[in-house]
Image (cartoon, helix red, strand yellow):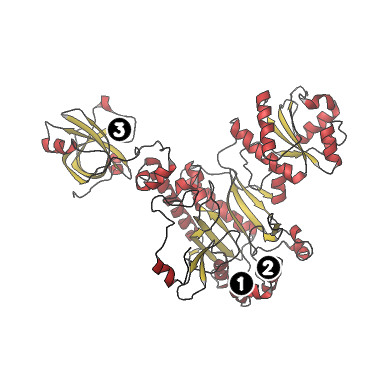
Amino acid sequence: MLERTHTVEDAICEPMKEETPRALTLCGWVERQRDLGSLIFFRIRDRWGSLQVKVDQTENPSAHAVASRLRAEYVISVRGHLQLRPPGEHKDEPGGDREVIPEEIQVLAEARTPPFYITDEEPGDENLRLTYRYLDLRRPPMVRVLKLRHQVALEIRNFLDRHGFLEIETPLLTKPTPEGARDFLVPARMHPGKFYALPQSPQLLKQVLMVAGVDRYFQLARCLRDEDLRANRQLEHTQLDLEVSFMSRDQLFALIEELMCSLFEQVGAGRPQSPFPRLTYQEALSRFGTDKPDLRIPAEIHDLTESFAHTEFRVFADAIGSGGSIQGLFIPKLRASRKQEEETGKFVRQQGGAGVVIAHLGHDQSVSGVLKKFMHREQLEAIRRELGLDPEDEGTLVLISGERDSILRVLGQVRLHVWERYQLPRLSDWRFAWVTDFPLYERDEATGELVPAHHPFSLPLPEDMHLLETDPLKVRADSYDLVLNGEELGSGSHRIQDAELQRRVLRNLGMNSDLIEARFGFLLRAYDYGGPPHRGIALGLDRIVMLLSGMHNIRDVIAFPKTTQGTCPLTGAPSEVDRRQLDELKLRGL
């Protein structure tokens, strides 16, 4: 093999003068080839880019002979010199002003015809891409994603190192803990009948590190959860896991905001606006119908129950009379067509909503639609005031009546759907927000039992502590999510540091003293030796890279992802194991 002297990027960035060709040796893959007889052109591609090679039979018959049998994705090395192309042959692309004139070409490996082209264009069959992932990862968009992911991880490490954090690895073989999803279990061969669990997160061990006096910890942790997959979830993912002692919520928020702003700026995505706005959980639901609002959408939900308190419109009057409410979403500058109104009404019904009314509010103080004959001028003015409209503002108002919480969530979906469906204008690219004070518990819809809204290690807010045993569903936690453009990047909380309080929180989940001791005794004992006040957060690295790269699925920012069925087409995982392995683990096959 010829010894490589330059990458393609080196060759593209090399300062050049027409009269001074540069000697170099490149190694890579054959991209495109044009055989014009005595002249052969092809591109050599490596991780850094691609560059044209021109082979003239009259100048180098031996190199031409090798070039004539090259095919796409052959691995080659090219020794020659770099020269500028004639001015009329310049291409508007990186390296388009230069080309390589080879003196020697070596074929290092031949290749079969790929099942898809290695280009910017994405192959349509995702299963095919994942089966031949080694080919898919050669495509320039995927190379860019891998580079971006590396850069994001590097910037995070450098930033946290400057702020006094230690990167500490926690074990992958640990014990099962309730964190909202099913564990992946690993049989313990040396302890028949017992199992390790692969970590859903390093939650408890990072809290133990705070008791150990580490003070500021982080790791880019691999986490595994046996849950159903969708666009922004995988069976395994990477998260920035972070825990701090003696830090207030304001201090942690400031640190994370500085990290995000620095990170986005360093990778060329622009500096987001800061400080990030803060919304309580209840405020987010009331204004946006979701706990992960997309603040790029310039519209909020408004409670118009009072404005319709004396309405003669029977649908709304009946809803209010039965204890329901009227919620409205105003879409500025949109004059919905009949077809758009029908589509929106159908979408509302698909989301479980009923009693939907769509009206146009004109800048001349007019109203159209079914409400026109039921709404007098004073009532219209009151609604416009509630919506915060100026006299010249106009647009479409979507109204839904019914049980407040359910219609808020429906309108939250309508808000996203309308802006996506009709490509309405949004605000600037990056809109972060903190959502705080989540419920500590929620009711499991299937079983009716209390379950943690986040996890059971979050500290209840002091003002709700007295409700812990009497009305636990009203207890809020000092917990928080970081949201970006409608995507939850991660969650965190102030942790419980008192062993007895931790036992009280766990008892509400139906755990008796023996079960609490069996599962969490090591953590509770640690608190007996001086646990500092501590809090933390975990941010999804995959989701951050997905948003920065403009991808819509985290499978596209993970080198070797699983399909939505939880399989790996490349390796064939999961797969059966032989009888001997099962016998060693004292397991019985199906």
Q: Please tell me whether residue 433 is drawn above or below residue 160 in the rendered image.
A: above
For disc 2, the neighbor class at 10 Å (few under 14, some 14 to 19, many from 20) is many
Residue at position x 53%, y 57% in the image = 226
Q: Front-most of 55 and 565?
A: 565
* Residue 151 percent location from the top left of the image: 43, 50
Q: Please tell me whether residue 187 is drawn above or below residue 249 in the rendered image.
A: below
**Residue under numbered circle 2:** 506
* Residue 87 percent location from the top left of the image: 26, 26
**Residue under numbered circle 3:** 96
Residue at position x 27%, y 38% in the image = 72
How far apart are the alpha carbons under marks 1 and 2? 10 Å
Amino acid on which the number 3 mark rests in the picture: Gly
**Residue under numbered circle 1:** 520
User: Is tag 2's residue or tag 3's residue first in the polypeptide sequence?
Assistant: 3
* Residue 583 percent location from the top left of the image: 43, 71
Amino acid on which the number 2 mark rests in the picture: Leu
User: Is tag 1's residue or tag 3's residue first in the polypeptide sequence?
Assistant: 3
Look at the image and tell me whether residue 113 can be seen.
yes
Amino acid on which the number 1 mark rests in the picture: Phe
For disc 1, the neighbor class at 10 Å (few under 14, some 14 to 19, many from 20) is some
- Are the residues tagged 1 and 2 within 8 Å (C-beta)? yes
Q: Please tell me whether residue 524 is drawn above or below residue 111 in the rendered image.
A: below
Left or right of 273, for residue 405? right
